Amino acid sequence: MTIPPTPQPLDNVQRQALDDQLSKRFIALDPGGYFLIYVDNTQGLIYAQHFANTINEKGLACDPVTGKPLPVRGPVERVPTHTYSGRTAKELCIAIFEDAGTPCPISYLDHAAYLGREFMRAEAALNTNAPYIQD
């Protein structure tokens, strides 16, 4: 058995460049829906609004009512299926993954991993009173 080489440590610039590169890869959209995440510093809460969608034959997220593809940019007038909140990333994950009931609103593991990373970024912004912008 061959042991793979240990990756070299990265400085902050290299780490950001790697993150930017990895963000450009193709990912399949979750048929369970998507989340818009924001922080309310006055309430000390992280919010995650869940929106249902369907995925069409081209792999585009579509409005489940109209069947039309959802725009990537600009305002979208939709009502969330549920709004989750938590004081920490962990509390928010528990609300979504353990307390949300059946079925879980997340179908794909890579989507769950992404949400965990985003919730941690949102918590860090909350802790430092810094702005949070979802990636």
Image: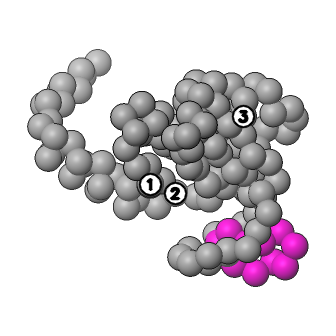
Q: Which mark is residue 133?
A: 1
- Residue 120 position, x and y percent, is 46, 34
Estimate the x, y position of residue 82 in percent, counting from the top left. Answer: 80, 48
SS assignment at label 1 = loop
**Few, some or many residues within 10 Å of mark 3 (<14, 14–19, 20+):** many
In this rendered view, identify the residue nearer to me: 64 or 92. 92
Say which quadrant the C terminus sits in.
bottom left
Q: Nearer the viewer, residue 2 or 29?
A: 29
Q: Quadrant of the N terminus?
A: top left
Sequence-earlier tag: 1 or 2: 2
Q: Please report the bounds of the magenta region as a residue range.
A: 60-69
Q: Amino acid at mark 3?
A: Ile
Residue count near mark 1 (Cα–Cα under 10 Å), binned few <14, some 14–19, many ≥20: few
How dense is the environment of label 2, judged by Cα within 10 Å: few (below 14), some, or many (20 and up)? few
Amino acid tagged 2? Ile
Q: Which residue is mark 2?
A: 27
Residue occupying image coordinates x 58% and y 49% = 37
Q: Is residue 28 visible?
A: yes
Find out whether residue 112 is within the magenta segment: no
Q: Position of residue 14 (x, y in %)?
A: 15, 45
Q: Which residue is mark 3?
A: 96
> Whole-Å distance between the Cαs marked 3 and 1?
20 Å
SS for dot 3: helix
* Amino acid type of the residue tagged 1 in the rendering: Ile
Q: Which residue corresponds to the image point at 75% horizontal and 46% vertical from the top-left?
A: 83
